[in-house]
Image (cartoon, helix red, strand yellow):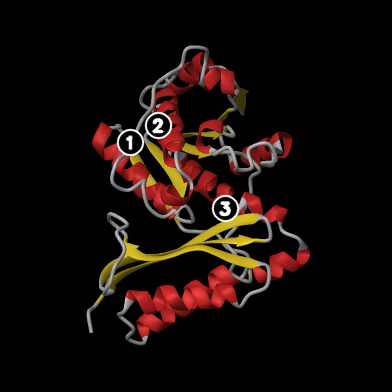
Amino acid sequence: MLVTQNITEIRQARWADPASTWGLVPTMGALHAGHISLAERAVAENDKSCATIFVNPTQFAPTDDLDKYPRTLERDLEMLEQAGINMVFTPTPAVMYPDGFGTRVLVDGVTDRLEGEHRPGHFDGVTQVVSKLFNIVQPTRAYFGQKDAQQTVVLKKLVRDLNFNLDLIVCPTVREPDGLAMSSRNRYLSAEERQHATVLYQSLSQAAEMIENGERDAENIRQMIADKVKSTPHAELIYSSVASNLDLSELETISGNILISLAVLVGDTRLIDNFMIDGIEPM
């Protein structure tokens, strides 16, 4: 497995056999089974595969946890090699953003709500770094997890609007046995906080059950989630949403294809999760 910080080496390896298909798995490291599921799918569906490990500073706000974001490079590389990844790009900030760098990639319309509303500038950093990774690796397919649902909507629009020559593949959220979505940030939780963090999955499950039983008032779903989180120790709701999964606009009446999502502060750890439900018939 090739491991390099050098863009030229990545491109040489990528184009050694121009006929080969390549899968790309962008990550910020601190890998878990969710990341590895993306890596394994990239390996299975392509001739060659590349993962990236880069804690991107431009998608962190000044109040975010950039400095304490976990970095476990040696372990990450072992996991990727076991998954069958062919090369790993591990750039430094100086490689990605050299002196004089001043280009931004902005996606309007789906970045100013949900995570974008509460983390201003976050998606500007995401679209900036992902555009660079797409151009550096030039993959056939790129793999992202459904847990970051808004990110996948933003990146689909990015690929479409800028005509990136790749397929963006969204893979299912990987969960712990009790339903908690796997996340690099879960390691920040204390044992007690970890128990209460299941409120995200429990809220989404109850929302799905309410809809299955005929609930079509989106505000009732949002309020149920708010009440459930409020009653949970160490948990503080940042937002709850019932939105169109196309443009992320909030719904009044539930029908069609929807995204139910929430962000919760559990102790000092910010967690997100979502369910996507398709084909809901109006009552």
The Cα–Cα distance between marks 3 and 1, rounded to whole angstroms, is 22 Å
Residue 58 lies left or right of residue 260; in this view the side is right
Task: Give the labeled residue for mark 2.
Answer: 139
Question: What quarter of the picture does the C terminus occupy?
Answer: bottom left
Q: Earlier in the sequence, mark 3 or mark 2?
A: 3
Q: Which of 140 and 178 is in front in this view?
A: 178
Q: Do the residues labelled 1 and 2 touch (CB within 8 Å)?
A: yes
When the figure is inspected, residue 136 is found, relative to residue 70, above or below; the finding is above
- Say whether residue 47 is visible: no
| Residue at x 29% of width, y 41% of height | 108
When the figure is inspected, residue 243 is found, relative to residue 128, above or below; the finding is below
* Residue 130 percent coordinates (x, y): 43, 33
As helix, strand or loop, the secondary structure at mark 1 comes to: loop
Q: In which quarter of the image is residue 95?
A: top right
As helix, strand or loop, the secondary structure at mark 3 comes to: helix
As helix, strand or loop, the secondary structure at mark 2 comes to: loop
Tell me the crowding category of disc 2: few under 14, some 14 to 19, or many 20 or more residues within 10 angstroms, Cα based: many
- Say whether residue 105 is visible: yes
Q: Which residue lies furthest to the bottom in this view?
A: 213
| Residue at x 32% of width, y 86% of height | 214
Give, as a three-letter code, the residue at label 1. Leu
* Residue 154 percent coordinates (x, y): 35, 45
| Residue at x 63% of width, y 75% of height | 232
Q: Which of 46 and 242 is in front in this view?
A: 242
| Residue at x 57% of width, y 48% of height | 35
Task: Give the labeled residue for mark 3.
Answer: 34
Task: Give the labeled residue for mark 1.
Answer: 166
Give, as a three-letter code, the residue at label 2. Pro
**Disc number at residue 25?**
none
Q: Which of marks 3 and 1 is nearer the N terminus?
A: 3
